[in-house]
Image: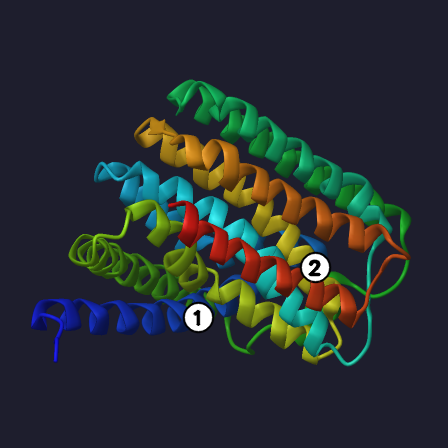
Amino acid sequence: MHFLPDTLWLNILVFAGSLAVLAKTADFLVDGAVGIAFHLNMPKMLIGIILLGFATTAPEFVVSLLSALRGLPEIALGNAIGSVVADDALALALAIVIAPAAIIVDSRILKTTGIFLIAIDLLAFGLSFNGTISRIDGTILVGLLVVYLFFVIYSEQKRKKKALGMSYEEEAKDHYKKGSLRKQLLWFAGGVAGVVIASEFLIDSSVNIAHALGIPEVVIGLTIIAIGTSLPEIATCIIAARKGHGDLALGDIIGADVLNVLWIIGMASIANPITVKPQVIYFSFPAMIVVVGTMLLFSRMGYKLQKWKGFVLLGMYVVYIVLTLLLF
């Protein structure tokens, strides 16, 4: 009987442990971020799209940036693309299936951020066609993120001035762990530290496993790491859906998708220009665009996300994983 080398088993254990720590510390990071937003009197929409989006994509960002800095830009790009697919076809799909009722979609989000999301996906796809996402390309992507953030903040402030009703505190108070601002800052800082440390071990163990089994590193980024670093989005979506806040889950996913393309790919390529393989250009990017486009189309259909749409997205994720393993 053939047994795997002890070093491989050790790396598998480290990888599994890193994922567990990553998920838990990212949860602390989310709680702290939302608590800080509450104490600073920030609106719920900004919590979901900006703070929660940045918090739940922190694992993807750290893994991708560290990978790029260490000369492994394929993992950075694969992780970002794989995370977008996992967010839409796994995290959101599970939320749709688990939600007690159909998720009601805010049409205003689709008319702004939804259109912006598909546009930047197409832009990133176009930038990759010459086989490299350069530092200039990365600067363009990060610059678009700055424009996006200013637009979201300006639009929300403008809408709030016209709207009547509960205060920002009333909107947010059901979505944070109670405690002083100091306690929320500690949650946040601890979450960031845990994410950084766990991500470091995640990269080391995943690369070692890939080398030991002869698996291309881009496959690890597109599948295992992408799913692992998407655990915060998966957990957030499921919890939000179970509590009847499916719209918050959708907002988090759209915000996370935007950050994966503009923030993660952008910063990773600034740190180290990314060489894009033909398989990524002709399969991974198109697959991401198809999944995102399907998610947005489903959201537009009646502005409701029923369970059958969740099952379709889950089916697309299974097909994506199978094709990825076959093509790479």
What type is the residue that disc 2 sits on?
Leu
- Residue for badge 2: 250
Residue 64, by quadrant, is top left
Q: Are marks 1 and 2 in contact (CB under 8 Å)?
A: no
**Quadrant into which the C terminus falls:** top left
Alpha-carbon span between mark 1 and mark 2: 21 Å
Q: Nearer the viewer, residue 301 or 188?
A: 301
Residue 301, position as x, y percentages in the image: 87, 54
Q: Secondary structure at mark 2?
A: helix
What type is the residue that disc 1 sits on?
Phe
In the displayed image of the protein, which residue is found farthest to the front? 1
In the displayed image of the protein, which residue is found farthest to the left? 6
Instruction: Give above or below for 12 relative to 261.
Output: below
Residue 222, position as x, y percentages in the image: 42, 50
Residue drawn at x 51%, y 70% is: 31
The answer to whether one can see residue 42 in this image is no
The answer to whether one can see residue 44 in this image is yes
Residue drawn at x 44%, y 27% is: 138
Query: Disc number at residue 28?
Result: 1
- Label 1: few (<14), some (14–19) or many (≥20) C-alpha neighbours in 10 Å: many
Residue 269, position as x, y percentages in the image: 38, 30
User: Does label 1 or label 2 sit earlier along the sequence?
Assistant: 1
Q: Nearer the viewer, mark 1 or mark 2?
A: 2
From the viewer's perspective, tell me whether residue 143 is left or right of residue 190. Answer: right
Q: Nearer the viewer, residue 7 or 242?
A: 7
Q: Secondary structure at mark 1?
A: helix
Instruction: Give above or below for 88 relative to 24.
Output: above
From the viewer's perspective, tell me whether residue 251 is left or right of residue 7. Answer: right
